[in-house]
Image (cartoon, grey):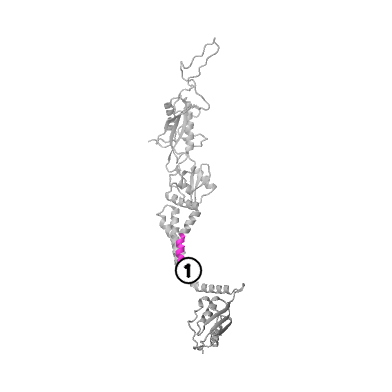
Amino acid sequence: MAQEDEALPKNLPAPKKAELSLSPATVAVQPLAHDEEIRERLQSVMEATGWFTAPDVKVEDGVVFLSGRVDSDDIKKWAGDLARNTQDVVAVANRIEVSQPAAWDFRGAWGGLAGLSRDVVRSLPFLVLALIILVLSAGAGWLTVRKARIFFAGRVRAKLLRGVLAGGLGVIVFLAGTYVVLRVSGLTQLALTIIGGTGLVGLAVGIAFRDITENFLASIFLSIQRPFETGDLVEIVGVTGYVQQLNIRTTVLLTLDGNLVQVPNAAVYKNTLQNFTATPNRRENFVVGIGYDDAIDEAQEVALKVLVDHPAVLNEPEPWVLADDLGKATVNLRVYFWINGHEHSWLKVRSSVIRLVKRAFQQHGISMPDEAREIIFPHGVPVTMLDATQEPTKDPTKNPTKNPTKEPKKDPGSLTSSGDAPRAKGVEAVSTKAEAGLSNEAGILVEQARQAKPVDEDENLLGTTSARPAKADLTAEKKSEP
């Protein structure tokens, strides 16, 4: 007879896949067990598990025939192994059918949700601890940013660079807290993956937003190098204007026409930049042509006298009047002179000098011909009369005389508005009403820009005050001679 049945619990729920145990190597049965004893033993075991629906066991000459229905292939295999390991079993014919779940069977889904809820409940302590660590790390990062700004305030001049360094330290502190949270949660590999993927994300963002990143980096370099200050007159990529603001994307210029122009910082950093305010003195020049019959040295002295007497033209560096070119109808003189850009407008001073030089040439009888409108015959044109009884006109070339069209020479210092009386020295003597004085219009333009579109000073990386010398009064006098 078979050994006594072990006490088995009745109506046990179907185990999960991980709960299935291996079938025993042997099942104790009395030697030379009969087919009925084997059947009863296997039948009782299968019914005791509760895993089978309508289980049925038949044994003929040591061959076991199993039938019924189960929910999984693992249970079917377990039943076959059980019968195979039973004493005196020769072979096993496993005819157990595996039931296919119905299309609307939600038992698996409910089981998954139940398992998920149990996992959430078990992980609540870790979630609370992680939340506390994240809050502490965020607070530590914020405190680090504040302390870093104070620390770098006296050591780093660039406002944007101070913000980047302080923000970077705060991000590092927060990432350290995040790493600790992942380590405590047992997600060390995920923590390493996030840290390693940060560089890849940064690279991808840099490629996707190349222009934005380029302008941002250029703003950092410009705020460090500071090639200009707020209020400086600069020329960038063909745009001339006063610097109003340097933000993280653009440099805002106020043009001489009163318009606000935004130039990308990348273009500012990569292209040639002229700063007219960095040094106060600026040289201007223009070309004036005189006739070939006029003496070059005399014209140079007349033009130089105008420059020396002009209150806006500097004596150091000294002005020049040089012979520049021999044109088709004129000898071209190039006039060089220096002005103080902080005090005077080069446009107005240039206009004044050109006007005064032209008037001085006219007063001294120096011609300024134009090849497109006038042809000069210095010694006149010989004329032959066809009437034989009339005495022919003498050739002026045989008895040259002074050109009667020339006026008597006058003192070059007698620059008058009407040619009658000398004019007084000073700005009023050389500036007309149309030129509106000689001072620059920086203050007027800045005030106009402030009224039209106020600049957000919080975004200005250059600050609100300029390190350059203050712009002079409209009535500033000419620099005294050494």
Q: Which image quarter: residue 340?
A: top left
Give the farthest residue toward the bottom.
1
User: Considering depth in this image, is 90 or 15 the residue closer to the camera?
Assistant: 90
Q: Main secondary structure of the magenta part?
A: helix
Amino acid tagged 1: Ala
The answer to if 194 sits in the magenta stretch is: yes
Give the farthest residue toward the front.
61
Residue 174 can be seen in this image: no
Q: Quadrant of the C terminus?
A: top left
**Local crowd size for mark 1, using a 10 Å CA cut-off: few (<14), some (14–19), many (≥20):** some
User: Considering depth in this image, is 42 or 411 the residue closer to the camera?
Assistant: 42
The residue at which mark 1 appears reads as: 130
- The location of residue 18, given as percent across then percent down, is 51, 76
Secondary structure category for the residue under label 1: helix
**Extent of the magenta region:** 189-198
The answer to if 31 sits in the magenta stretch is: no
Question: Compared with residue 349, is residue 376 higher up or lower down, i.e. above or below?
Answer: above
Q: Which image quarter: residue 481?
A: top left
- The location of residue 331, given as percent across then percent down, is 45, 28
